[in-house]
Amino acid sequence: MERCFVAQQFHDNYERKFYYLRLSVTDVCNFKCTYCLPDGYKPSGSRNSSFLTLPEIKRVVSAFAASGTSKVRITGGEPSLRKDFTDIIATTAQTSGIEKVATTTNGYRMEKHVGEWREAGLTHINVSVDSLDPRMFHQITGQNRFHQVMAGIDRAFEVGYEQVKVNVVLMKNLNYQELPRFLDWIKHRSIQLRFIELMQTGEMDDLFQNHHVSGTSIRNHLIANGWLLKAKEKNDGPAQVYVHPDYQGEIGLIMPYEKHFCETCNRLRISALGKLHLCLFGEEGVELRDLLQTEDQQPELIARIQAHLRTKSVSHFLHDGHTGMTPHLASIGG
């Protein structure tokens, strides 16, 4: 259905415009990653809470598209655990104004299903692979699925993806020594490695103190070895992307502790329970679900989102030691 009106571009008081929606469709995950859910998944919310339905997802994506959003990332937890995951992709991709439909997955279902995801309209895919050593992979994720995930990446190229992004959280005393191995891995592969700096959330103080590696040290290593910064597009995520003439792959650095990290913020988050989150490390969230029940509520939905954007802070203040209210990254989609 075509939009009946074009709303104003979502924006805040700091002249930041929001082209990118991270949409969580579940907070359930079957992995137990050290930096996210070390004790495994535990249900959040009340017993009566349920995840966004497909019609609700359609309405929230349509509202964002009407307000200038052109990219949607479908996240979790592990989004492919939803039985209607392919339908969610198709519904998002068919929304007028949405140009990029991405997902972030742990990859365990990719080998079997990535072809149908692509046919449904998934344009970009990120896979979490925190080690190229099967034993270390098992230690970090709690799952002995390394070869299954790698087969899924191979399958993604076979079905037509020109590039796959691979997310890596490098951690001191765990997988940080694998940096040279990761770089060698992408020399002749069209993979964008995305090194994500370990972030301190409410439940992870000890882990952060023991394993945090500064993204600046990785960047300095890259620059010293001939890697060059690549220009961004308006709906790109927060990564600083580096390229090298001798490498087919790329490196993306996500460094939330940099002082000016928030100046280019262009993304908003919707939780699997239908709350708007203005920042990964922000507040309890703004309830939207009451305005997702009918299509004719879209103007009111857009107005509520824009009104709360006026309260968005200039920064997450992580560099000042603030960890916010987010208990773990799976709770609102990372």
Image (spheres, rainbow, N blue to C red):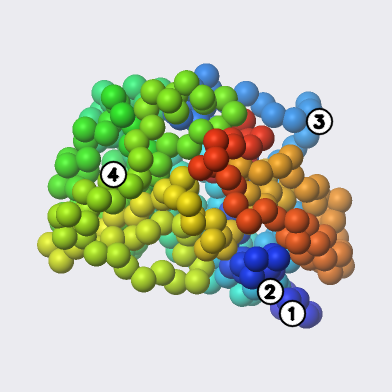
- Amino acid carrying label 1: it is Val
Q: Which residue is mark 4?
A: 217
Marks 1 and 4, how far apart at CA: 44 Å
**Which badge, 3 or 4, is on the more N-terminal residue?**
3
Count of marks placed on residues: 4
**Which badge, 4 or 2, is on the more N-terminal residue?**
2
- Amino acid carrying label 2: it is Gln
Residue 238 picture location, percent across and down: 46, 57
Q: Nearer the viewer, mark 3 or mark 4?
A: 4
Give yes or no for contact between labels 2 and 1 (Cβ–Cβ under 8 Å). Answer: no
Where on the picture, by quarter, is residue 209?
Answer: top left
Instruction: Assign a secondary structure to mark 1.
Output: loop
Residue 14 picture location, percent across and down: 65, 66
Q: Which residue is mark 3?
A: 48
Marks 2 and 3, how far apart at CA: 35 Å
Give yes or no for contact between labels 2 and 3 (Cβ–Cβ under 8 Å). Answer: no
Residue 155 picture location, percent across and down: 31, 50
Q: Nearer the viewer, mark 3 or mark 1?
A: 1
Instruction: Assign a secondary structure to mark 2.
Output: loop
User: Is 275 left or right of 304, judged from the image as shown?
Assistant: left
Give yes or no for contact between labels 1 and 4 (Cβ–Cβ under 8 Å). Answer: no
Where on the picture, by quarter, is residue 81?
Answer: top right
Q: Which residue is mark 2?
A: 9
Residue 109 picture location, percent across and down: 43, 41
